[in-house]
Amino acid sequence: MASPPRHRTDTTRWLTASQVLATLHRHPGITRAAMAHELQLTSGLATEITARLRDLCLLTETRAPVRGRGRPTTVLQPHPEGPVVLAVDLRQEDWRHAVATVEGQLHDVRHQSHRTRQPATVLAAVRRSVDETRHRYGHRLRAVSLAVAGTIHDNHLVQAATLGWRSVDLGTITAGTNLPMLLGNDATLAGVAEARTGAATAAGTALHLIVEVGIGGTLTIAGVPVTGAHGAAGEYGHLPFGDREQRCPCGARGCWDLDVDGRGLARHLGESPPADPRSYARQVLERAAGDLRARQAVAAVATTLGTGIAGLANIHDPDLITLGGLGPALRHTAAEAFDNAYTDGLMTLHRAHPPPVVDAAHGDDGSLRGAAIVGLDHITSRTALADWVRALAP
Amino acid sequence: MASPPRHRTDTTRWLTASQVLATLHRHPGITRAAMAHELQLTSGLATEITARLRDLCLLTETRAPVRGRGRPTTVLQPHPEGPVVLAVDLRQEDWRHAVATVEGQLHDVRHQSHRTRQPATVLAAVRRSVDETRHRYGHRLRAVSLAVAGTIHDNHLVQAATLGWRSVDLGTITAGTNLPMLLGNDATLAGVAEARTGAATAAGTALHLIVEVGIGGTLTIAGVPVTGAHGAAGEYGHLPFGDREQRCPCGARGCWDLDVDGRGLARHLGESPPADPRSYARQVLERAAGDLRARQAVAAVATTLGTGIAGLANIHDPDLITLGGLGPALRHTAAEAFDNAYTDGLMTLHRAHPPPVVDAAHGDDGSLRGAAIVGLDHITSRTALADWVRALAP
DNA sequence: CTAATATGCTCGTATCACGAGGATAAGGTG
DNA sequence: CACCTTATCCTCGTGATACGAGCATATTAG
């Protein structure tokens, strides 16, 4: 994403300023004194940096509410003329967008259903949203960050099964605007959101898994996703945990995918594969309260889920595992089955302190928030800061 | 490992010097001009840094062989009074150690068989080696880096099945010496060696897998292993790819481990589990040339291996996969079975350019070299450089 | 009002890096 | 052999960032 430094100074210049902004969007509403403490800044340096960032329209300060003795400090806030990113989340039924400031707050959140799923139509709508945002924010808009429910490979969308898309060129969204476009898988970005502002903020290494149609996710290390060589990592649903006779639409056999979503529930219930596995799964989960067979099917799937997650805990050794999508419902509906399978699948080593499995905090918003976070990471990077400075005072 | 910076300057001071040393041990025998080009140093800065490092006994320069026009440059070499690390590889049958200089060269490589496998005896022998090295190198010895064929958790050895050890305190190796001890899993460190100086140097994201008793490995990103929250990541053998009825010594069920080593071969041959799965596997592999049943067993195991590796390629999206231990032999003895299973297990997405599976370059030396590399990374870190400077001129 | 406390600000100093221009050591050429 | 070309090394003035000490400032506690 970030271009390699051309000068040595690029590696150190704006480094602390960049860290200040990163800390700001990790702890919104942080005071200047707390920031200085967090980053081990001397008071002199804190003065210098805030002055610099104020001059650059990157933050403002307001008086902090007083607490106890001592000279009152200030609260750091995004500057009304500061840079923003447009975050977009492209999903099966609809798409959403929001404008994020350096502090991480989402503004102008909007939500639109697809009229048709034709790629051209959808992309044109997103493009209009980019143009509107450019019109409203002008040069303040510094990047577009896109979450897509599909497979990314070398910054291209290769396939989006739920949208029915294959290899769509997303370049039109920012063509001719000079805006960098950041592209990410929706599950990956939801994992980033959990790690940075969600249920896994305390974790250094966190695994996020999301069950929708199949199962995807990401490993994050200190809030940074492990994306692989081409950005296609995290396809946990395509591990061969299942029956080798089953052929998966992905091309492989025995994929975990087939056992943990609506398709898996249908097979346990002796029904034919559902057209929409997600809503089918929700129905079965609702029925499970009163229907023994539904409950048994859910328990079987929860067992498969727990066993697989335990295997992933063995290979990744995470601090924490967050579950999104249908995961929480599956797990809570068949809590015993899940917990037994999970514990049973762990290596003895991990049994004393199994990595906690917790529900994702962001729910449906994860991908959008993750896209915003990645976009903000980009605009607060040293190179982007240097660009902003150049644009401001050439 | 490295203590958190106490001052802001700690994050930038010695940064370039540290990068110079890192580059030196990534490209042994590099010239000063090439280094300057690599790190985008201006000639003035190159002069300044080399002078600084020369004064600090961190490198020396000798005239480079002349090639073409221009003022001749110099070759950067480790200083005869510079810091070293002791790398130790603790294995089932024996242990080895070597002293590494900043350039990455191994000196004084030694090799000793265990007389007994009593932890106390083995550790005492290692401790003697540390003391001898301290005696010979004095203050130049800056760290001990230990590779162990066992599971690491929070810098403790929790279990070493092949050695028959459980939860052994390795602190005695450096107790009272003030030397930092770096501890790593052997497969993890072998992966580091492949990524840094072996078959995966060109890869950004590389997966290393090693088949011995079971299968272990590591994912490396830019030469840095993904070690998880407690350093226990990489237990790929404990993914539930296998038959859920099989109970694994690790505590879980259906572990891949049980199917890809000598135990898997024995099961296919209808024999009872071998006492030493590794030498058993070597025997079967030798027999396979003439013995149809052995060949079929190898093919079955190679298929299991290929399918599993494909699944890992799906989740990690690596540039390259390196195979060590028995892996190359298994794969080449049943090349067709392996290749078919590997291709068949990949998502369609990866089929156009499957991540190449190549044999590890370091063979038996990987763990020792990996331990040396991790040790050198430590002594060339900014904090350790600052310590070295303090020790040299207080 | 005064003491205690926490924070912000100023200024001199140190480190690191840049860039321009000159110096140096080789090969190539007539 | 004198001289040009080329690639590198070296020096020096300048600028950016960070530190540390000391002082200034704003609030609470008593």
Image (cartoon, coloured by chain):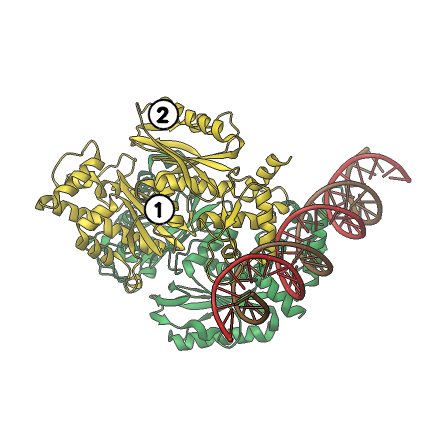
Chain colours: A green, B yellow, C red, D brown
Would you say A86 lies left or right of A288 here?
Answer: right
Q: Quadrant of residue D4?
A: bottom right
Report the front residue among B78 and A104. Answer: B78
List the residue tagged with mark 2.
Answer: B122
Q: Amino acid at mark 1?
A: Leu
Whole-Å distance between the Cαs marked 1 and 2?
Answer: 34 Å
Would you say A393 lies left or right of A266 here?
Answer: right
Subunit of mark 1? A
Labels 1 and 2 in the same subunit: no
Report the front residue among B249 and B134. Answer: B134
Q: Alpha-carbon neighbours of circle 1 within 10 Å: few (<14), some, or many (≥20)? A: many
Question: At 33% across and 66% down in the image, what residue appears?
Answer: A161
Q: Quadrant of residue B348?
A: bottom left
Q: Amino acid at mark 2?
A: Val
Mark nearer the viewer, 1 or 2: 2
Residue B265 image position (x, y, % from top left): 17, 41
Q: In terms of secondary structure, where does tag 1 sit?
A: helix
Report the front residue among B294 and A128. Answer: B294
Would you say B192 lies left or right of B69 here?
Answer: left
Residue B110 image position (x, y, % from top left): 36, 32
Report the front residue among B354 and B140. Answer: B140
List the residue tagged with mark 1.
Answer: A312
Subunit of mark 2? B
Count up the numbered dots: 2
Marker disc for residue A376: none
Question: At 45% across and 49% down in the image, what residue appears?
Answer: B29
Q: Is residue A290 above or below residue B367?
A: below
